[in-house]
Amino acid sequence: MDKLSEAREKINSVDEKMAALWVERMAAVKDVSDYKIENNLPVFDASRESSLLEKNISAVPEELKPYYREFLKGVIDVSKSYQRSRLSGHDGKIRLELGDRSYDISIGRGLLSEAGKLMNLDRGVLIVTDDGVPEEYSKTVAAQCKSPVTVTLSQGEATKCLESFRVLLKTMLEARFTRGDCVVAVGGGVIGDLAGFAASAYMRGIDFYNIPTTTLSQIDSSIGGKVAIDLDGYKNTVGAFWQPKAVLVDPDILKTLDKRQIFAGLAEAVKMAVCFDAELFELFENGEPLENIDEIIRRSLMIKKSVVERDECEAGLRKVLNFGHTIGHGIETAEDGRLIHGECVALGMLPMCSQEVRGRLLSVLGKLGLPPSVTADRDKIASAMLHDKKSAQGGVTVVKSDEIGNYRLEKISFDGLFEILDEFLKVMRG
């Protein structure tokens, strides 16, 4: 046997041993993923990955170290992919406990086609969507309903108004909906808010289901029961607390969104990480958000679930979820559509952070391609802030963060709030 054949035989022998070791390693990875499912832990662990690389690379000759690093990173990436597939393939239900208003949030890829099993659609169903949502999504839901009626509205914040509210109520009235029928939102936060408010008002309240189709709504607005419409240009002025009967979160739906929408929605997950979850923030800092989006969605929903269960009607703790919104809503109104909601929330977080948090936050927001500055007129922002729903007589409660994973509430005067705004605009505009 020549030297080439001998070398190849040796490689074959080593490969057989590696295959057996690989199976053994993946069995251990399975055990790890089972533990993470049970304890709601992330797939990505930056410190663990870094130490694993350094420890194992030190055991190979210097000449081979760069090649072994590449090999080992591939092994780790495949292991993470396997863990993600198991986490997304398990039951995937989060139970939001609110007594007789409790409901399941089902999370998993491909769940849209299972809507009929997860929701009671064997009755009259008003499906509310908009023309920015692929028609196939509402059709998939309608095919699982006994008596579907679909209303497709125009895309955008302007749809969340009294006229659209009237259209939905009139449609249900003409279709002879009873208190035993229901409303299903298939869309982003605008559609969820509007459809939920219509459900809360029709015949003093009928069942409501939410199927969020944007990153923002999957992460945040689809659960918690805050439903509303805008009035005279001011966001969420008229609304109610009306919990859905169930929420279906299918990350596959996000594939039709452009990156701007995806990243703007992720700003809400960053918001929760800054206030509650340092590990989730590190996932943004050290990982690739799009690769970890299933995990980001789940961890964000777990945070919001915990907050809503302790403060359903925003009497105290739930105000923390307004981090970034006090100034962010003012920016959103003043920008008049040039910036979308998540982008404005991202900007609104910056002036409410310590210098250390702001530096780390700016790095993450830059990674997500979110805007670094504001062009809107200062007085327009201030005027909108005065009308914001979180304002109160003589002042406003703002949420601040001095370190990642923690928050504090501070009551300040309007003058104090405007001082924060002015300092922020001064820094942003150089």
Image (cartoon, rainbow, N blue to C red):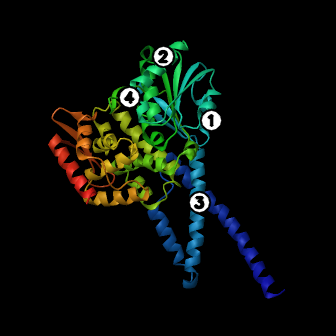
Q: Where does label 1 land, which residue? A: 136
Q: Viewer-nearest of labels 2 and 3?
A: 2
Q: Is residue 180 above or below residue 322?
A: above
Q: Where does label 4 land, which residue? A: 228
Horizontal and vertical percent for residue 429?
A: 27, 57
Q: Do the CB atoms of the residues marked 2 and 4 lie less than 8 Å apart?
A: no
Q: Where does label 2 land, which residue? A: 170
Res 169 seen here: yes
Kind of residue sitting beneath label 1: Glu
Horizontal and vertical percent for residue 57?
A: 53, 76
- Report the Cα–Cα distance between label 2 and label 4: 18 Å
Please tell me which of labels 2 and 4 falls first in the chain: 2
The disc label shown at residue 34, or none: none
The disc label shown at residue 79, or none: 3
Q: Nearer the viewer, residue 214 or 219?
A: 214
Residue situated furthest right in the rendering: 1
- Report the Cα–Cα distance between label 1 and label 3: 34 Å
Category of crowding for the residue at label 1, using alpha-carbon neighbours closer than 10 angstroms: few (below 14), some (14–19), many (at least 20) = few
Residue at point 43%, 40% (across, down) = 220
Kind of residue sitting beneath label 2: Lys
Please tell me which of labels 4 and 3 falls first in the chain: 3
Residue situated furthest bottom in the rendering: 2
